[in-house]
Amino acid sequence: MTRTFARKRFRNSFAATALLVIAACSNVAQAATYTMYRDPGCGCCLKWANHFENGMDAEVATVDTTDMGSVKAGKGVPSDLWSCHTMVVEGYVIEGHVPAEAISKLLRERPAGVSGLAVPGMPLGSPGMEYENRVQPYDVIAFGPGGRTVFASYP
């Protein structure tokens, strides 16, 4: 085998290995697990987690706790924005029945001064709160050091 051929083969082998490592890393990023805190007696949280998993192509790990007030306060969710479950997504706090598309937009845009999104209460027709064909209009509120703003409105 000539020296030139051996060098080319090494470079091609190195390039192929590098591509495999990059591909593996990107798959790991796509397969991130998100953590949702919920009261074990709440069923709508699991329905919302299913909506999130399908909409974000992600896996949700659930942590059952009966002290949701401490979780929410510890994550910095303003008490007037509380709902039934709290999730941590790539450093952001997601409170309540926030649609996956709003979370996707948050992760894409990463607006300054925003530490999370919330849908206060449990509006009928929001993800996880579907009942017959009933729908209540609701807002997704962005909150954080930059204040509060309506991030999205549904329906």
Image (tube, rainbow, N blue to C red):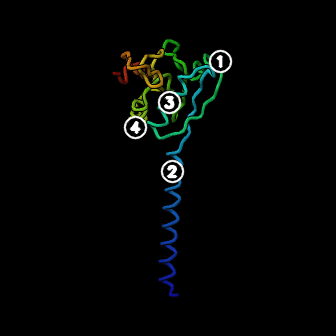
State the separation of the CA atoms marked 2 and 1. 34 Å
Mark positioned earlier in the residue sequence (2 or 3): 2
Instruction: Determine the image quadrant of residue 148.
Output: top left
Q: Amino acid at mark 1?
A: Asp
Using the image, determine if residue 27 lies above or below residue 12: above
Q: Position of residue 15 (x, y in %)?
A: 48, 67
User: Badge 1 local density, few (<14 within 10 Å), some, or many (20+)?
Assistant: few
Numbered disc in front, either 2 or 3? 2
**Tag 3 near tag 1, CB within 8 Å:** no
Q: Position of residue 107 (x, y in %)?
A: 43, 35
Residue 67's disc is: 1
Q: Nearer the viewer, residue 60 or 107?
A: 60
Asked which secondary structure carries label 3, the reply is: strand
Residue 7's disc is: none
Q: Position of residue 134 (x, y in %)?
A: 38, 17
Tell me the residue that label 2 is attached to: 27
Taking the image as shown, residue 58 lies to the left or right of residue 136, namely right
Using the image, determine if residue 8 lies above or below residue 63: below
